[in-house]
Image (cartoon, rainbow, N blue to C red):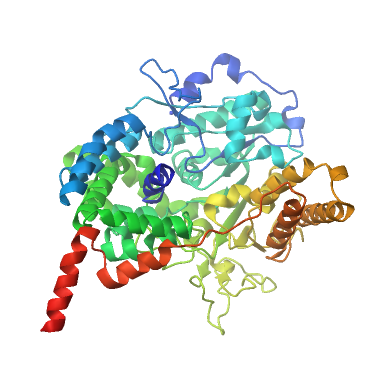
Amino acid sequence: MKKNFKRVLALMLSLLLMLSVCTCAATAADEQKRTTCGEDCAFYPTIIVPGLGQSSVIVTDDNGNPVLDRKGNKISAFPAYLQIGPLLKKMLMPTLMTLLLQRDVGFSDAFADAIDLAFGINENDLNGKTVTNVKTEKFPYSYAECNDYERSVINTHIPFELYPTDLPRDHLYYFSYNSFANHIDLVEELYAYIQMVKAQTGHSKINLVPLSQGASIVSALLAYHPDVVDTLHKVMFVVPALDGSRIIGDVFNGRITFLNADYLYNGFLEEMTLLDPQTAHLIEVLARIFPDEVLMSALQKGVKHLVENIMIRSTSMWALCPSADYPSAAAKYLSAPEMAAIKAQTDRYYQVQLQSRANVQKMKDAGVQVFCVAEYNYSLINVGENWNKQNADFIIQLDSTTMGAVSANIGETLPADYKQQNTHCSNPAHNHISPDHMIDASTGLLPDTTFYFDNQRHDLTQHNDIILKLAMELIAHDDIKDVYSSPDFPQFNHGRNVKTILELLDKAETVNRKLLPKRRAAALDAAVANANAVLSRTVDAPDALPNAEAQLKTALVRAGALRPDIPLPDAFSPVSRFLFSHFGSNGYSELPSVLLSGLFKAAA
């Protein structure tokens, strides 16, 4: 339950969703040329600008030293700092008294204070500046110069080691940052980082690969430092938050689904998909130990503290608010005089959002090669009320990642007589309607250089080997000019997650075939060969990977190297559904009164 509690807490933030270090660390020694190729090199230095939480931000003490856990590991500050002892001290007595008396005896206030304690590690001041003891682990040099620990940090978020590239490792850079930090500071940091990379490599042009939240930084970079266009050779947006996420827009505007008690007990956790059904239904059953008014009061206060004490002081979080949602959210939270400094910054970025497509077009017109990877056929996480009202990739709506592509909603298709609009494509030979008739890519700003992956979740992008292979090819070579350049990378492709099958292949390597009956050894070898064949293909049937994974699992089970999957019966599902059907959102202590009320009504 502790693990699930942590996941729910983390989800509330991630869903409700340094000009300093970099410029100071870029000493004269750092700025000396680190490579000898210079402009004679066939490659361009490439800077990865990662997404939300894809940088190592650690908790430090007052002297700036890392705080370590009991195992000696650094403690992450993203998205929260869960200090179990202080949290229990704060929550234990109010929880026990509330359960005993079945009324709110300080529980909701303690829960809100616990939110402040955990997420307060990311607090900013009224200028949008971080005021807590956190430190971003930065890499002011290339991947080639990173030590083993630093490479492990990078590969945790983007597994470079799994996907070789011709790009020399001394031309690969990772721009890490705090996802809650001041957005303008991050833009200035990135601008300085680009100058540092140019100095270290001797190149006058570089590639940028912004992922997710990283695209908001790059979008502002184009507006605040338009001269940077002269430095860019190629930009590859990967599931970019170019116009924010409706999740953040809903949260900032108070449109939160789970604050509706009926929905909380009737599908919220199950629809979330981050929890398995058994766990979701177990939580639904256990949560009824609190009266519904107590539970809802705690959630309302917790969300209020999370939004008002943490999120609205983070200009980076505001940069994830869609332009359509910003004016109402700003009026709600940024009108007070004390919020003026933050509002000036967020207003500035709002203007960037309104001009972001024009700025990307200017970049393209200047000769910069601009590519994009988008994912679709997922609804948004069901935190905000707009979660199922547009096509998305689980985190960001398609309109934001594609800069305008028209799409049908999840489970639907465009009208049978729909004709592509050709808003940004004038070539009549180009067919930009997806095979599933769900997407019209011609309305996106980059119809000829945007690659689409259906049924791909945003948070699992790093486990889609095809996307990573495409990225590695694009940053190393200029052979791919558009979505028609290579049959290996068509405009429309299927999403997939290779994490499990790679783990199974590693397991298969440890099996001693000599100890197996010939038939089982042959079956294992055949399953391994099939898995590798599937992984070698970048275009395949959507069921090819699941089938190969199932075949390999079966072979490993029969070889005695893997325990069979035994699905646990979802015993709590009928209980949860029965309770909701007959008692709504009431807690257990309220059931007798509900029953008596029903009996009196029946008698009347």
Query: In this rendering, would 297 be left or right of 399?
Result: left
Which image quadrant: the C terminus?
bottom left
Query: In this rendering, would 457 be left or right of 134?
Result: right
- Where residue 64 sits, quadrant-wise, is top left
Q: Residue furthest left?
A: 604
Residue at 78% over, 53% down: 536
Is 19 in front, or is 95? Answer: 95
**Residue 188 image position (x, y, % from top left):** 45, 32
Query: In this rendering, would 583 be left or right of 137?
Result: left
Count of labels in the image: 0
**Residue 127 image position (x, y, % from top left):** 28, 33
Residue at 52% over, 33% down: 176
Q: Is residue 92 above or below residue 286?
A: above
Query: Does the image show residue 257?
Result: yes
Q: Is residue 209 above or below residue 575?
A: above
Is 374 in front, or is 220? Answer: 374
Q: Is residue 208 above or below residue 554?
A: above
Is 403 in front, or is 77? Answer: 77
Is 98 in front, or is 419? Answer: 98
**Residue 481 image position (x, y, % from top left):** 71, 54
Query: In this rendering, would 564 be left or right of 1?
Result: right
Residue at 19% over, 37% down: 338
Residue at 59% over, 37% down: 156
Query: Does the image show residue 124?
Result: no
- Where residue 437 sits, quadrant-wise, is bottom right
